[in-house]
Image: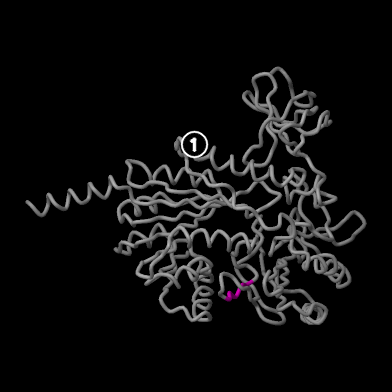
Amino acid sequence: MTKQQGDLIEIMIADLSNTGEGVGRFEEQVVFVPDTVPGDRAIVRLVHVKPKYAHGKLHELLEASPHRVRPSCIVADKCGGCQWQHIDYNYQLVAKHNQVIQALQRIGGFVNPPVDPMLTASAPLGYRNKSTYPLGISATGQVQAGYYQKGSHQLVNLNQCPVQDARLNPLLAEVKQDIQQRGWRIYDERKHQGQIRHLGLRIGRRTGEMLLTLVVKDWNLPGIETQAQEWLKRYPLLMGVSLNRNSDRTNAIFGSETRCIAGVPYLREKFADLEFQILPDTFFQVYTEAAEALLQVIQSELNLQGQELLIDAYCGIGTLTLPLAKQVRQAIGIELQPEAVQQAIVNAQHNDINNVTFQVGAVEKLLPEMGIVPDVVLLDPPRKGCDRAVIDSLLRSKPSRIVYVSCKVATLARDLKLLCEDGQYTITRVQPADFFPQTAHVEAVAFLVRSHLDRNTESLTKTQNSNS
């Protein structure tokens, strides 16, 4: 491409990248363009040009794709919270399904992966049970809360958000005014000065119970106890107000210490006929109903008989461990975060589930040390996927079945390739699910069984050893 940064080109958008950008070609070069849809014909301004690819910005839409729709949010073209509000929901599902297949083929090397149709969201808007907003100050000195503009640290102020549970919108709009009236200083990340960094809101979708959390630089927030009591009176379903301290110069939202200022430090949520206690910084899937639907797929596919030993690696607070524990002989959860394990134990006791134990530690360290052969191993790692030591441990212990839940299909495909090398495991089914409508993120669960070839080889070895 002889074009340079700032030049205008005309292209047809043909695909979507796994980060949500439209993809087109100019001459022999791939061009990535945010805010476009396959089928768009557009004038694009080049903003970043490399030898093999370029990034552009939509300059003029010449012909709109049939999959382009009017966004539900008035600041969707600015806010970085969603990438796909301009794409009709059915086509979002098509794109995510293709994303899973392409990752398994290109990264995993699976020629014809058994990918089921998307498990669709019951509601593509108003689904988020948790939102955490950075705070800022406008040019006129008003407290703002929202998401950063795409590709910048420029805050887009919001008074409501169409993807979060609508019951949280009043808090988003009104708490900013209370902060303004209290005169609390908003944190400036460039100067590392000021007090309040983020506003965290959380709701139990089934119970309606809510939590409000302020992430602060230090604990010195004059009048917070009085204000917290006022919030509890104003919002009847607000269960607790907490402060979380994050004094580091970091992009991480939460610090390591949280204090409940008023009310209780948790909300209750009903999930899979169980009741969970969830803290302000607890990891819990943001789309409760979609997570429960995926759990039902897992339960149906495993068809547990009550005699199995199950290990849930990366178990968190036991969101999947506890419902599955009710269907097996024994369940073991492994989790790196001690606070999450403590919550898992509390949730097990609260639901009178006695056949489950939880261990604190890294999966790559604890799993090889267990010295047991589980019937089922459930993997639900972070976006980076499994450590190689986890894969090697599974290949040595050879559980009959592996269930791999993933929030990043690229690392899922990489790890499945390792597990299926030499024919030790076979993928029987991959179920993609839409946990994050209006974004490019896709969840998927892969089901693996030990292959007949591997079991026959093991049996032959045992026979030969016994004969000798």
Task: Residue at 51%, 53% (x, y): give it.
Answer: 445
In the image: residue 291, left or right of residue 336: right
Q: Residues within 10 Å of mark 1 (few under 14, many from 20)?
A: some
Task: Residue at 85%, 71% (x, y): give it.
Answer: 178
How many numbered marks appear? 1
Task: Residue at 67%, 81% (x, y): give it.
Answer: 264
361 or 44, which is in the foreground? 44
Q: Which residue is tagged 1?
A: 105
Label 1 is placed on what type of residue? Gln
Q: Is residue 417 above or below residue 129?
A: above
Could you tell me what secondary structure mostly forms the magenta stretch? strand
Residue 433 rendering spot, x and y as whole percentages: 59, 52
Position of the N terminus by quadrant: top right
Q: Residue furthest right?
A: 140
Q: Is residue 188 above or below residue 209?
A: above
| Quadrant in the rendering for residue 48 | top right
In the image: residue 238, left or right of residue 418: right
Give the magenta part as a residue range: 275-279
Residue 71 rendering spot, x and y as whole percentages: 81, 47
Give SS at disc 1: helix
| Quadrant in the rendering for residue 251 | bottom right
173 or 214, which is in the foreground? 173
In the image: residue 180, left or right of residue 92: right
Question: Is residue 92 inside the magenta stretch?
Answer: no
Residue 392 rendering spot, x and y as whole percentages: 35, 50
